[in-house]
Image (cartoon, grey):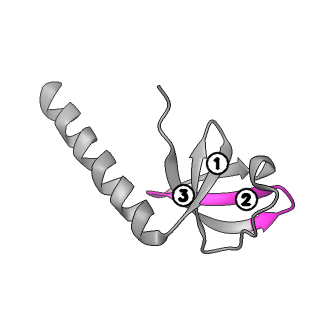
Protein backbone atom coordinates (compact mmCIF):
# COMPACT_ATOMS: atom_id res chain seq x y z
CA UNK A 1 0.00 0.00 0.00
CA UNK A 2 1.21 3.48 -0.82
CA UNK A 3 0.17 6.58 1.12
CA UNK A 4 -0.16 9.94 -0.58
CA UNK A 5 1.89 12.60 1.17
CA UNK A 6 0.59 16.17 1.12
CA UNK A 7 3.31 18.70 0.32
CA UNK A 8 3.41 22.50 -0.15
CA UNK A 9 4.72 23.75 -3.49
CA UNK A 10 7.77 26.00 -3.17
CA UNK A 11 8.50 26.51 -6.87
CA UNK A 12 7.45 25.25 -10.28
CA UNK A 13 9.71 24.71 -13.29
CA UNK A 14 7.85 23.19 -16.22
CA UNK A 15 6.53 19.80 -15.12
CA UNK A 16 8.61 19.70 -11.92
CA UNK A 17 7.67 21.27 -8.60
CA UNK A 18 9.95 21.71 -5.61
CA UNK A 19 7.79 20.78 -2.61
CA UNK A 20 8.17 20.67 1.17
CA UNK A 21 6.55 18.78 4.02
CA UNK A 22 7.73 18.52 7.62
CA UNK A 23 11.06 20.14 6.71
CA UNK A 24 11.79 17.68 3.90
CA UNK A 25 12.03 18.95 0.32
CA UNK A 26 11.47 16.86 -2.78
CA UNK A 27 11.18 17.36 -6.51
CA UNK A 28 7.75 16.19 -7.64
CA UNK A 29 6.68 15.42 -11.20
CA UNK A 30 3.62 17.33 -12.39
CA UNK A 31 3.26 15.15 -15.48
CA UNK A 32 -0.01 13.58 -14.27
CA UNK A 33 -1.51 17.01 -13.57
CA UNK A 34 -0.80 18.82 -16.82
CA UNK A 35 -4.32 20.28 -17.01
CA UNK A 36 -4.16 21.80 -13.51
CA UNK A 37 -2.66 25.22 -12.78
CA UNK A 38 -0.14 24.82 -9.96
CA UNK A 39 1.61 27.73 -8.28
CA UNK A 40 3.87 28.18 -5.25
CA UNK A 41 1.85 27.91 -2.07
CA UNK A 42 -0.48 25.24 -3.45
CA UNK A 43 -0.71 21.85 -1.75
CA UNK A 44 -0.32 18.60 -3.69
CA UNK A 45 -0.63 14.95 -2.76
CA UNK A 46 2.54 13.16 -3.83
CA UNK A 47 2.84 9.43 -4.51
CA UNK A 48 6.04 7.80 -5.78
CA UNK A 49 7.40 11.16 -6.92
CA UNK A 50 4.29 12.19 -8.85
CA UNK A 51 1.69 14.78 -7.86
CA UNK A 52 -1.69 13.09 -8.05
CA UNK A 53 -4.10 15.63 -6.58
CA UNK A 54 -4.33 19.29 -5.58
CA UNK A 55 -5.74 19.78 -2.06
CA UNK A 56 -6.49 22.67 0.27
CA UNK A 57 -4.20 23.65 3.12
CA UNK A 58 -6.86 22.35 5.52
CA UNK A 59 -6.98 18.94 3.81
CA UNK A 60 -3.19 18.72 3.90
CA UNK A 61 -3.11 19.61 7.61
CA UNK A 62 -5.82 17.04 8.36
CA UNK A 63 -3.87 14.32 6.57
CA UNK A 64 -0.71 15.21 8.51
CA UNK A 65 -2.63 15.05 11.81
CA UNK A 66 -3.63 11.48 10.96
CA UNK A 67 -0.09 10.56 9.85
CA UNK A 68 1.34 12.01 13.09
CA UNK A 69 -1.11 9.87 15.09
CA UNK A 70 -0.07 6.76 13.15
CA UNK A 71 3.62 7.49 13.73
CA UNK A 72 3.03 8.11 17.45
CA UNK A 73 1.16 4.81 17.78
CA UNK A 74 3.93 3.01 15.94
CA UNK A 75 6.52 4.50 18.32
CA UNK A 76 4.53 3.20 21.30
CA UNK A 77 4.43 -0.29 19.81
CA UNK A 78 8.18 -0.30 19.15
CA UNK A 79 9.15 0.79 22.68
Range covered by the magenta-colored residues: 12-23
| x and y percentages locating residue 32 in the rendered image | 76, 47
Q: Is residue 21 magenta?
A: yes
Q: Which residue is mark 3?
A: 7
| x and y percentages locating residue 72 in the rendered image | 20, 42
Q: Residue furthest front?
A: 35
Secondary structure found at label 1: strand
Dot placed on the residue nearer the N-terminal end, 3 or 2: 3
* Disc number placed over residue 52 in the picture, else none: 1
Secondary structure found at label 2: strand
| x and y percentages locating residue 58 in the rendered image | 40, 70
Relative to 64, is 56 above or below?
below
Q: Nearer the viewer, mark 1 or mark 3?
A: 1
Q: Does any portion of residue 79 appear in the rendered image?
A: no
Residue 35 appears in which quarter of the rendering?
Answer: bottom right
CB atoms of marks 3 and 2 within 8 Å: no
CA–CA distance in space, label 1 to label 3: 11 Å
CA–CA distance in space, label 2 to label 1: 12 Å
Dot placed on the residue nearer the N-terminal end, 1 or 3: 3
Q: Which residue is mark 2?
A: 17
Amino acid sequence: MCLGIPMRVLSVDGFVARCEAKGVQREVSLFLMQEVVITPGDYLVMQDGYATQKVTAEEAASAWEIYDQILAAEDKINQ
